[in-house]
Amino acid sequence: MTNATAIRTALLVVVAVVLLSPLASAQQEFGDIVQVYVDNEKGYRDIPRVKVTEDSIEGVTYKNQANRSERKAAGEVRNVFYGDAPTEWSRGLSEMASRQYDRAVESFKGAVNAFEAKKCGPWVKEYAAFQTARCRAAQSTMEPKKYLNEALGAIDGFLSEFPNSRLKPDALLVKGDLLLLADRSAEARGVFSDAEALAKGRKLFVRYEFEALLGKARSYAMQKDWTHAITDYQSIEQRAGNEVRFSSSPEAKAYLQDVVLLAAGNQGDALLSKAESTNNSAHFATAKQYFEGLTSRLGDSDRVKAMSGVGVAVCLLAENKAREAMRQLAEVKVAHFSERNEVAKALYYMSKAADKLGYTKQAVIYLKELRELYPDTEWARRAD
């Protein structure tokens, strides 16, 4: 799983558990709540005690207590809190958050049964279908041979059955990631382009457009179109950095800062992949110079130091300085243990360094640790 995918998955699970559970609206007198923008991007406010009568990608229509119908456009709608969620729905979200995906899928099936028995609102069927697809997508990152086709079928089924769902942008991003996993980069790029256009047209939260842009850049990298990939990552980093300065929303600002680091890290990975695929010493020199300059350009946070440390170590390994590379990779593993993707990458290259040093048993141990602790990462898939 890429950093972008991991971030997106974590955010969606948290939002779903907190905002769509019965507890979120248990104290409300009249059902649902719509949360909308105030003064564009300066904050949000709740519209309590309303009844949502239509929830679609175009926006939300609701009735207030005076029984007047009002409508909010998609760009204004932040979240909808549902007050009639069945027990199976909440249980499925909890199981999903703890990575018990098969159990979660069964719970979501139970939620759909509750809808069919008219024990809850029609939103349950739609949202359960989406979360089921996301469960299979998460499993695909760990066992693509077993789950990838099922995940693609589930997300396509959702998009076909609910073409006007407000979850459509999220579904397109999930589908794009799955297509990349299936090595169908050109198709993925088309899906990410659709997600980008939808985000722009509906003026959705900044995350959607940047996730689509990052997905398109990854699709170029997977096709070894390094020029397009590197140029796109540079553009994304620059644009996100510029938007950070003008954003007044703390949530948007934090996300954009993360995009800056993600794009910078992915650009470094593209430089390394280019060097590895060509085995060109000049390309490794370019990559090494890039990683050495990261901290001076982006600061010395744990994440940046971890990215820099692993990148430089990989270049040292290419220079046949395996022992020095091993020391640097081990330092990242210990000192920056919370940086999940970089530690997974460090373990992958520690195995290669151990092999070069003749420590074949230790190399196997590193790969075993990688698969057990970080099974959903790109590096675990590479190890297979």
Image (cartoon, rainbow, N blue to C red):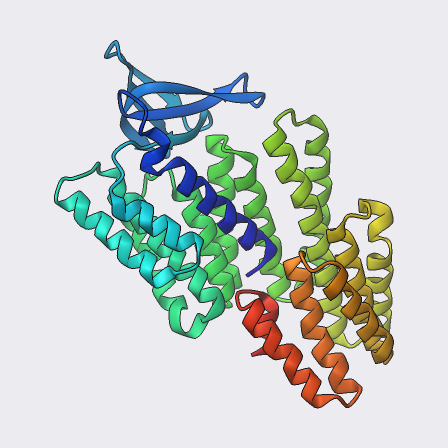
Left or right, 211 with respect to 133, comes to right
Q: Is residue 270 above or below residue 68?
A: below
Residue occupying image coordinates x 79% and y 66%: 331
> Residue farthest to the left?
117
Residue 32: x and y, percent? 31, 26
Q: Nearer the viewer, residue 201 or 261?
A: 261
Question: At which x and y percent is residue 302?
Answer: 75, 52
Which residue is found at the position 73% from the left and 41% from the top? 238
Residue beneath the point at 55% across and 61% down: 1
Q: Which residue appears at 52% of the width and 60% of the height?
A: 186
Is residue 381 at all visible to an observer of this figure?
no
Write down the quadrant of residue 352 in the picture: bottom right
Say if 69 sits above or below 276 in the image.
Answer: above
Which of these two is toward me, 208 or 337?
337
Answer left or right for 21 relative to 331. left
232 vs 335, left or right, is left
User: Nearest the camera: 346 or 21?
Assistant: 21
**Residue 369 in the image, given as x and y percentages of width and height:** 61, 74
Confirm whether residue 201 shows in the render.
Answer: yes
* Whether residue 18 is situated above or below residue 111 in the rendered picture: above
x, y percentage for residue 121?
Answer: 21, 36
